[in-house]
């Protein structure tokens, strides 16, 4: 994969997204001013931000869940209660 953002937790994704947004803003500013070291940097940052936005959205709609949540949800679903399963 291009960047391994999938192993980051939700709060880490938000922090990383803000860092990349700042870098992208600085790259755009430098392009306008004329101090461009890497002309492809803005495009690369924009794509990384899009990948992060996808992961953040997956957390928000419930496609991705935090690592601790599935274990607790699976444990409660698999254990029958007193009135069930007889």
Image (cartoon, grey):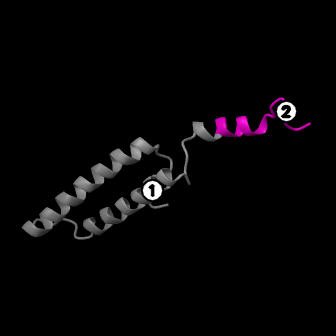
The residue where tag 1 is placed is 57
The image quarter containing residue 25 is bottom left
Closer to the camera: disc 1 or disc 2?
2
The image position of residue 7, as x and y in percent, is 50, 47
- Secondary structure found at label 1: helix
48 or 83, which lies in front?
Answer: 83
At x 92%, y 36%, the residue is: 86
64 is higher (above) or lower (below) than 31: above
From the viewer's perspective, is 54 left or right of 16?
Answer: right
At x 84%, y 29%, the residue is: 82
73 or 8, which lies in front?
Answer: 73
The residue where tag 2 is placed is 83
- Secondary structure found at label 2: loop
* Residue projecting furthest to the top: 82
Q: Crowding at label 1, few (<14), some or many (≥20) Cα neighbours within 10 Å?
A: some
From the viewer's perspective, is 81 left or right of 65?
Answer: right
Q: Is residue 45 magenta?
A: no
Sequence-wise, the earlier of marks 1 and 2 is: 1
Magenta residue span: 71-86
15 is higher (above) or lower (below) than 75: below
Q: Which mark is residue 80?
A: none
Q: Is residue 77 magenta?
A: yes
Q: Measure the alpha-carbon separation of dots 1 and 2.
A: 38 Å
Q: Does residue 86 appear in this view?
A: yes
At x 42%, y 61%, the residue is: 51
């Amino acid at each position: 994969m291009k960047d391994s953002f999938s192993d980051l937790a939700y709060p880490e994704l938000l922090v990383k997204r803000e860092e990349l947004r700042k870098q992208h803003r600085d790259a755009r500013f430098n392009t306008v001013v004329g101090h461009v070291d890497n002309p492809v940097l803005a495009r690369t940052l924009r794509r990384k931000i899009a990948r992060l936005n996808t992961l953040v959205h997956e957390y928000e709609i419930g496609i991705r869940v935090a690592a601790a949540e599935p274990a607790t949800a699976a444990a409660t679903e698999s254990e029958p209660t007193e009135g069930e399963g007889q």
